[in-house]
Amino acid sequence: AIRMTQSPSSLSASTGDRVTITCRASQGISSYLAWYQQKPGKAPKLLIYAASTLQRGVPSRFSGSGSGTDFTLTISCLQSEDFATYYCQQYYSYPRSFGQGTKLEIK
Amino acid sequence: EVQLVESGGGLVQPGGSLRLSCAASGFTFSSYEMNWVRQAPGKGLEWVSYISSSGSTMYYADSVKGRFTISRDNAKNSLYLQMNSLRAEDTAVYYCARWLQFWGQGTLVTVSS
């Protein structure tokens, strides 16, 4: 099974900041990597798929990069609505696996 | 509009059984693979099970293998998860999902005496 490791597990930042979350796969997954945002009590929302393709309707301040084993999610200018928990997920093979999550909090 | 609506959650005793349902609408259900994902209270996301569009292929997480069974009824546009021998650690919100974009709102399963 492929293990996904996210870092950091939590992050404090201010509105307007640029933040980066990393995700590492235990083996190569090409670009089969998605990023989700989840707010309390809600289902995850797809932000990025294929490592760097922005889902329709997602603001352009979100971007993703990487391939193989190392990936990043960058939010270029934090807005108040971006404070949430973020997960990466590999869809290269089953069992599917998620990172443990990164909780983005207001400083 | 794609909609996935889970139901069937509730409180069950350890060792008990529960059957979750997911009603799909807004797309051709029989053409899509489906998954169940769960999230324990305050924890991260955990993939649980997969079923192919025809229902001929299923996969399970090791944590539920031999206890949970995924199935679907394409005529009824419905996905199911039969959960047997439930344990406290199965307590979670269960989501049905059509990768990657569409998720239901979740149904809470609580395993407790």
Image: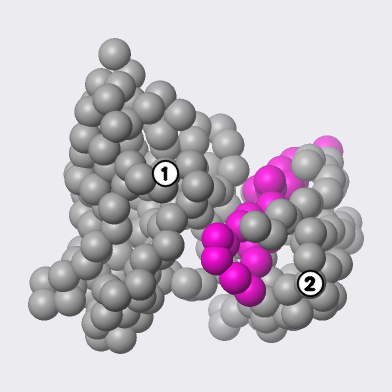
- Quadrant in the picture for the N terminus of chain B: bottom left
Question: What residue lies at 27% left-to-right and 25% top-to-bottom?
Answer: B15
- Pointer 2 residue: A28
- Quadrant in the picture for the C terminus of chain B: top left
Check chain identity for marks 1 and 2: say if they share one: no
Residue A95 vs residue B27: left or right? right
Q: Is residue B34 above or below residue B107?
A: below
Q: How is the image coloured?
A: one colour
What element does badge 2 sit on?
loop
Mark 1: amino acid: Val
For the residue pair B83 and B100, the one nearer the viewer reads as B83
Magenta residues span A85-107
Q: Is residue B37 above or below residue A9?
A: below
Question: What residue lies at 78% left-to-right and 42% top-to-bottom?
Answer: A9
- Pointer 1 residue: B64
Question: What residue lies at 85% left-to-right and 67% top-to-bottom?
Answer: A70
Is A99 within the magenta? yes
Question: What residue lies at 29% left-to-right and 75% top-to-bottom?
Answer: B56
Q: Could one spot residue B106 in this view of the protein?
A: yes
Q: Is residue B30 above or below residue B35?
A: below
Mark 2: amino acid: Gly
Counting from the top left corner in percent of width and height, residue B32 is at 35, 80
What is the CA distance from the residue labelled 1 to the residue labelled 2? 26 Å
Counting from the top left corner in percent of width and height, residue A90 is at 65, 66
Counting from the top left corner in percent of width and height, residue B81 is at 27, 52
Counting from the top left corner in percent of width and height, residue B105 is at 36, 53
- Count of marks overlaid on the render: 2
Taking the view exactly as shown, the residue that stands out farthest to the front is: B66
